[in-house]
Image (cartoon, rainbow, N blue to C red):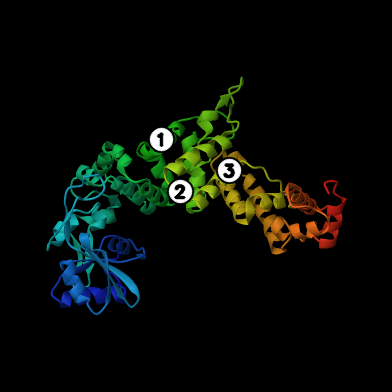
Amino acid sequence: MQEKINIPSQVNTVLNSLENAGHEAYIVGGCVRDSLMGIQPKDYDVTTSALPEETKEVFRDYHVIETGIKHGTVTVMVDKEPIEITTYRIDENYVDNRHPESVTFTRSLREDMARRDFTMNALGYNPACGIVDYFGGVEDIKQGIIRAVGDGEKRFEEDALRIMRALRFAAVTGLTIEEETIKAAHKHKELLHNISAERIREELSKLLCGKEARSVLMKYVDILGVILPELLEMKGFEQYNHWHIYDVLEHTAVALENVPPVPVLRFAALFHDMGKPATFFQDCSGVGHFYGHGDVSRDMAAVIMERLKFDNAAKERILRLVEKHDMQITAEEKAVKRALNKLGEEGFYDLISLARADNLAQNPLLAKRQEHYDKLEIIAGEIIAKEECFSLKSLAVNGRDLIEVGYSQGPELGAALEKLLECVISGEIDNKKEELLKKAIDFSII
């Protein structure tokens, strides 16, 4: 494991400036953890023995932003890079299972580290002292363990979001949550009800995009079920047909694992079969069917995303994928053009990604369907490369052109344009203005 950490020059400037003024200073938390795991940190947080006013005085010649000075944090701009600097602190009583009622500043780095969530995040580093590790975080990283600092129950009672963070770290890093820590998480899982929807959604999104999301979903569905009770209905729900070898939950987990780690696609995979338990029907031969489950899954996903306060653009993309995930597209140019028209270019490729993953989570005997999706992508690529017409946007006539040949504003105008587009997609006429106008005049709706 890498134990010498390369620090950006701007961060070194901050550390050196604080130390030259007689204060302690370390990079801390995720940037140290990631560096030790061979992951390039996205940002660097600095902690210091200097009080906020002392920090401001050290950097009086820099642009200083009082980011959260009440809690000891200021941001210093160094060569146009923002560096957050936080005074060592002790968090006082947590009144809402999330936020400390107040903080007390301390000159002790150990006391500051003791309030942190997991040992792997309770690490400090500076070039002179090397790694500072009071709670065995380095060894836990080496052993592949996520362990609460001190008493896990107390950590989760203080801030219940840490339960989701534990699961998220397990999904993203592949580390295993230590036994006593996960026991505490199970015991206090209901405290997740006290966490804001936005923070839950943020952690859930990162979790689902982790390389071990399938494993975490299956192992900790009872915890995730606090925020997504819909998942609990899927666990152990057998499908009773030859298309499937997994129950609904594991099918979902395998499908999720097989779409690219993009939040929209991962959420669509999570939701796509959620309506199956509610639509299950077993025929006289004992074969299971789920008629209309796409629509039911869409409606359930809409409720969940409203609950978790998704933005409208993400909701729209996810709901369309969930509703259309079983859409059949034949490997013909006109069929692909119709799909491109209905879904848009981005939506088409998203749907193919979801369909591939759905197929990979079914009976392996159906794996030849992957070849069909290959063909669809080839056909779509050729259509797009040739700039062929598959939408009103690329049609050689528009509403103004039809008005000039006798159409009036209104529903008939839109209907005529859609009809012309279908004629072009089906190959009945070419996408040429003269031919389209002639065809429009021939329509009986003029």
Tell me the number on the disc at residue 310: 2
The relative height of residue 392 versus residue 66 in the rendered view (above or below) is above
- Label whose residue precedes the other's in the sequence (2 or 1): 1
In this rendering, position of residue 399 left or right of residue 344 = right
In this rendering, position of residue 363 left or right of residue 40 = right
Label 2 CA crowd tier, 10 Å (few <14, some 14–19, many 20+): some
Residue reaching furthest to the top: 284
What's the residue type where badge 3 is placed?
A: Asn
Residue reaching furthest to the bottom: 61
User: Would you identify the image quadrant in which residue 112 lies?
Assistant: bottom left
Mark 1 against mark 3, which lies toward the viewer?
A: 1
In this rendering, position of residue 219 left or right of residue 354 = left
Q: x, y (%) of residue 162?
A: 29, 48
Q: Which residue is mark 3?
A: 359
- Label whose residue precedes the other's in the sequence (3 or 2): 2
In this rendering, position of residue 229 left or right of residue 124 = right
Q: x, y (%) of residue 263?
A: 47, 52
Q: Which residue is mark 1?
A: 229
Look at the image and tell me in which quarter the N terminus lies.
bottom left
Label 3 CA crowd tier, 10 Å (few <14, some 14–19, many 20+): many
Q: Residue at x 24, y 80 (%)?
A: 61
What's the residue type where badge 1 is placed?
A: Pro
Q: x, y (%) of residue 347?
A: 60, 52
Using the image as rendered, state which of residue 63 and residue 243 is in the foreground.
63
Q: Residue at x 72, y 60 (%)?
A: 394
Tell me the number on the disc at residue 24: none
